[in-house]
């Protein structure tokens, strides 16, 4: 079974193909790629085989002159690439969908009814779901004979207890599906899977998925019991362009000053570290400025890492202790300074990082805590696309 996985974001679309076979523990990568620069005159497409080398016809440049001014143009470009005569045949397609809304629950095959429910779910995730719905419709039109599946970022968090998901709001509001869903679930699930495979799955674990979007999740025996994001991916800890949790009065104040659309744009695109630093959404750039004495950049980093430390410490208390802390996501995996700054605030709990291990690079599950640390600290790559392929493979084989 050859499974195409599409993982779409606001400025890029990742895509990959996995192949599964009877008797093989998990699908293997055939190729992976990414189209970057949506909204620009030309987009850059990177395409690599399982060994990291270039993939496709010799000498081909899949990104040359490719228009991607809109998400529709971007997905058309990707579908053109993956359906080329030199490419492996697509036999199933899986999509990462951020929010299922109030009606949909588990990962599932996409039908006309599911698409209607996803359209309704746009009210819960107007930043993410409209683009992925466009991608799904384009994919189903391109490959009408193969099954298509939606894999939701919220499913991993369905194990959270009611007291963790319930907002203290009137019953009629909660009945509309207003609750805490949690996100980055595919990433968290992949981390649990990798930790278990490495023989390192602890009883009480916190996963800090830190990238442009950031979340912190409390995990007990492999199951989510609480997470920082709420009904939407805007809440929780401070992020690249999103503020995380705010006093509701702040939102009301902003709504008295300007239109809803302007406030929504501010909270999703102009807040967070971008709003604090006045710089681009690039932690490397912010760190470089902070190193040169830029006070706004320094404050942005302190607010960001403090928010992660605070939630991590709270979850450690909630779980009665912390056996392991895992960093993942673009920043969590690749920025040792962020890890060190988050961990500095946890020293009172006996958390100690090994500076040399923390500074080293790697692509597998790796331990970066000192031998005397009361809590193990790991860096683990997020494998969202693989998790989608695993779920699609299971749904195709079982028909569930």
Image (cartoon, helix red, strand yellow):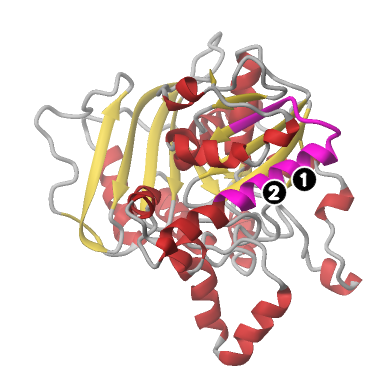
Q: Is residue 251 magenta?
A: no
Q: Give whichever of 219, 2 is nearer the camera.
A: 219
Instruction: Using the numbered discs, state the Cα–Cα distance from disc 2 to disc 1 in whole angstroms.
Output: 6 Å
Q: Tell me, for residue 141, which label it has, or none.
A: none
Measuring from the top left, give residue 215's x and y in whole percent: 61, 48
Q: Residue furthest left?
A: 59
Answer above or below: position of 61 versus 65. above
User: Which region is colored magenta?
Assistant: 305-326
Depth check: give the residue in front, 372 or 39. Answer: 372
Q: Which residue is mark 2?
A: 310
Q: Residues within 10 Å of mark 1 (few under 14, many from 20)?
A: some
Would you say the residues marked 2 and 1 are in contact, meaning their CB atoms lie under 8 Å apart?
A: yes
32 sits to left or right of 54: right
Residue at disc 1, secondary structure: helix
Residue 245, x across and y down, in percent:
67, 63
- At numbered mark 2, what does the secondary structure look like: helix, strand or loop? helix
Relative placement, left or right, of 117 versus 362 is right
- Which residue in the structure is indicated by mark 1? 314
Determine if the magenta segment contains residue 307: yes
User: For the residue carrying disc 2, how many other residues have a C-alpha within 10 Å: few (<14), some (14-19), or many (20+)?
Assistant: some
Magenta segment main secondary structure: helix
């Amino acid at each position: 079974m050859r499974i195409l996985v599409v993982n779409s974001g606001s400025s890029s679309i990742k895509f990959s193909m996995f192949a599964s076979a009877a008797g093989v523990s998990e699908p293997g990568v055939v190729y992976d790629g990414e189209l970057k620069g949506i909204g620009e005159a030309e987009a850059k497409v990177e395409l690599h085989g399982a060994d990291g080398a270039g993939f496709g016809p010799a000498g081909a440049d899949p990104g040359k002159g490719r228009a991607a001014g809109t998400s529709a143009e971007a997905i058309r470009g990707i579908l053109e690439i993956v359906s080329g005569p030199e490419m492996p045949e697509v036999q199933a397609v899986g999509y990462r969908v951020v929010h299922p809304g109030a009606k949909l629950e588990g990962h599932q095959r996409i039908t006309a009814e599911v698409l209607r429910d996803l359209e309704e779910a746009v009210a819960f995730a107007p930043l993410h779901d409209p683009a992925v719905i466009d991608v799904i419709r384009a994919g189903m039109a391109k490959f009408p004979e193969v099954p298509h599946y939606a894999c939701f970022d919220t499913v991993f968090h369905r194990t959270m207890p009611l007291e963790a998901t319930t907002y203290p709001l009137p019953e009629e509001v909660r009945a509309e599906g207003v609750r805490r869903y949690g996100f980055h679930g595919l990433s968290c699930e992949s981390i649990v899977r990798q930790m278990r495979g490495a023989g390192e799955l602890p009883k009480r674990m916190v996963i800090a998925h830190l990238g442009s979007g950031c979340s912190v999740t409390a995990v007990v025996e492999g199951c989510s019991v609480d997470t920082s994001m709420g009904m939407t991916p805007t809440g929780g800890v401070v992020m690249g362009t999103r503020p995380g949790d705010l006093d509701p009065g702040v939102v009301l104040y902003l709504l008295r000053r300007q239109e809803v659309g302007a406030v929504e744009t501010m909270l999703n695109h102009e807040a967070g570290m971008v709003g604090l630093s006045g710089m681009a959404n690039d932690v490397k750039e912010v760190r470089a400025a902070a190193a040169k004495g830029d006070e706004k950049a320094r404050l942005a980093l302190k607010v960001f890492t403090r928010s992660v430390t605070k939630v991590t410490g709270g979850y450690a208390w909630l779980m009665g202790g912390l056996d392991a802390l895992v960093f993942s996501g673009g920043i969590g995996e690749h920025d040792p300074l962020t890890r060190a700054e988050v961990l500095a605030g946890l020293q009172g709990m006996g958390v100690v990082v090994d500076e040399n291990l923390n500074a080293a690079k790697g692509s597998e599950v790796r331990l970066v805590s000192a031998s005397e640390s009361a809590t193990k600290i790991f860096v683990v790559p997020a494998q969202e696309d693989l998790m989608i392929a695993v779920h699609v493979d299971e749904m195709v084989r079982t028909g569930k």
